[in-house]
Image (cartoon, grey):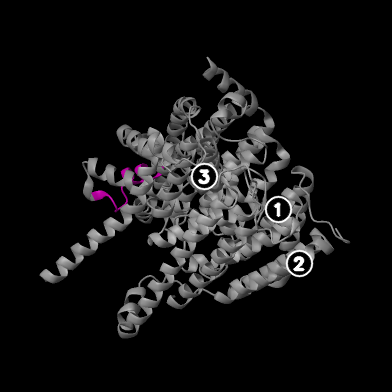
Amino acid sequence: MVFLETLQFGIGHVFGIVPLLLIAGGVFFGIIFGAIPGLTATLAVALLLPFTYGLGAFNGLSLLLGIYVGAISGGLISATLLKIPGTPSSIVTTFDGYPMARDGKPLEALSIGVFSSLVGGIFSTVILIIIAPQLARIALKFGPWEYFSLGVFGLSVVASLSAKNLNKGLIAALIGMLIATVGMDPVTARPRFTLGFLQMEGGFSALATMLGFYAATQIFLDSREVNTVTKAIKLQDKRNLLTMPFKLVKHQVINFLRSGAIGTFIGILPGAGGSTAGFIAYDQAKKASRQKEKFGTGHYEGIIASETSNNAVTGGALVPMMTLGIPGDVVTAILMGGLMIHGLQPGPLLFTNNADVVGTIFVALLVANVMMYFIEGGLMRKLARMIQVPKHFLLPTIMMMCVIGVFSLNNRVFDMWVLLVFGVLGYIFVKNDIPLAPIILGYILTDIIEKNWRLASMSTGGDVTPFFTRPISVVLLLLSLVSILYPIISERISNKRKNNEASSE
Amino acid sequence: MVKSEIGIGVFLLLVSAFFFADSYNITQSTITAPMAGASFFPRVVSMLLAASSLYLILKAVMLKRRGKSGSAEAAAKSGPEQPETGTPNEQAVLVMVVATTLYILIIPFIGYLITTIAFMSATSLYLGSIHKKHPWYFTVPVVIGISLAAYVLFSTVLSVFLPQGILI
């Protein structure tokens, strides 16, 4: 019954004119950001985060979730029409979406993609609604040992997955952790590394850090390439996108379910995001298909697998963020920031203390997915033209929004400088293959890791054995070790194989 | 590439050295166990970062030594990674960084509107000039429109604090 009450709260908060308009606006904005190559879902959510402060928790979250859902789906437009994934998670859509569009069926490709996005999004939201409250109940029993190990696990997966070079992934995570230690410490509130400046006692604010490394860096990277224009495939016939896919996708129920399940599961795991889900779902769909040879040549089953799974990541990724306060990827880390600026602490207590917020997230996510289908499908011709918005207007506008957004949240000039310095640092890091995702996750997770380490040590007087004797904690720590060692071992094995091949030749 | 990796490694080594050294300046409370203190965690992280940076430097130096004999091979390897469409314009990055620096520097004194229009006009004209898409008498009004629209949106709909100077 508690469950129904939660949803009732959500319906009450979401079904009003203002929140519905905000979700629709968010979805629209998100689709555009997702569709324009170079602008990502992460950037879209981060950019609007400071401006949701004045909207209040419920409306602000509705807007942010709308942007998230829209942006992940919007990537398919440019993946199909330009062969460039608009947002990293739609890489796999280019495999079949673009060939299909090139062969004269762009509308079919887009409509299948949009419909699959809807199915994936709804599927994962339903799973989220079912399992999140259960997981939160289990998480209530977690002590500092479990939280510490969870934080370490999340960070180790991100560090080892996001870079080709493990050392660089680790470096990135450690940089993020050090950035987070500046300012008041989380347990005894001692100022650390402030160099005597009062302004530094608040530390580097989450928003300035995230916008710096994600948005400002992205603008610097994009500004190098304002002169490259790729030709898009034009949409000529005027058929209705919304009703088209039903004939095409009738016999694909299993593909939808499988891809949705893969996406949701990958979303729940920390570190792996939409593109990983897309690759795995695509692979599985190909294995199971009767028309394997058609994959990669413009086959609709491939589009379904990719778009269902990458949109299913959205609901999955919210599971650990909402129930444990551990974001699995950068977008949810930023969404978590969105909860926190409204004074809400994600974690199991959110489900008992703020059932109305939880319900709002559930309902807003469902509504956002439905709206995404109608907005993206209905306005596709306009959206397809928008992906070629001139970058020389776009990039300065985004930079301006970053600067103003960062300033507006705390009214601190200092935060604007943090944005700029981290933006430049991020640019240098990216050029040297140091990934940015572990920096953000390291920054966000340090609070959880350090606080729980210290609380645990205090409660046992410095005895660390509980970390290794409590079952959940030790399993998580072992998994972290595996995720760090896995790339090293697999590299060794593949090197050996290469050497063997070379010597046998 | 290798050279800048060594540079980054040295920079990060210095950063971790600073954090390690400065962690001794944190005032410790006496009640807590040493492992639960405020300086323990940053000290561990800075040591790990120092170790990783050293590894980065060593690897880059080794690669550089090997690279002298097999540089042709390395060049062939890095070849296909370069995108074929146009050459990335590094100068644009510098212009954006300088423009943003000036923007942040001036905005607390002059205020949002004038500074934003100036910043956006300068950067839009510069970025637009690279492929000469629009003439200035098109770009500038568009930019003023965007700045005004953002101003209205920020201050009325979203009730955002804007930097205020002597001119709005």
Chain that bears disc 1: A
Measure how far apart labels 2 and 1 are at the Cα level.
22 Å
- Secondary structure type for disc 3: helix
Q: Is residue A460 left or right of residue B147?
A: left
Say which residue appears at 55% left-offset and 55% top-offset. B42
Closer to us: A67 or B6? B6
Q: Is disc 3 in contact with disc 2, using a CB cutoff of under 8 Å?
A: no
Q: Which residue is mark 3?
A: A449
Chain that bears disc 3: A
Q: Is residue B111 above or below residue A472?
A: below
Q: Is disc 3 in contact with disc 1, using a CB cutoff of under 8 Å?
A: no
Position in image of residue B14 (x %, y %): 55, 69
Amino acid of disc 1: Glu
Label located before the other in sequence (3 or 1): 1
Position in image of residue A230 (x %, y %): 47, 65
Secondary structure mostly seen in magenta is helix
**Range of residues picked out in magenta:** A294-307
For residue A241, say whether it is visible.
Answer: no
Residue lying farthest to the top in this orientation: A1
Numbered circle sitting on residue A201: 1
Closer to us: A268 or A304? A268
Numbered circle sitting on residue A131: none
Chain that bears disc 2: B
Amino acid of disc 3: Ile
Q: Is disc 2 in contact with disc 1, using a CB cutoff of under 8 Å?
A: no
Q: Which residue is mark 2?
A: B105
- 10 Å neighbourhood of mark 3: few (<14), some, or many (≥20)? many
Residue lying farthest to the left in this orientation: A504
- 10 Å neighbourhood of mark 2: few (<14), some, or many (≥20)? some
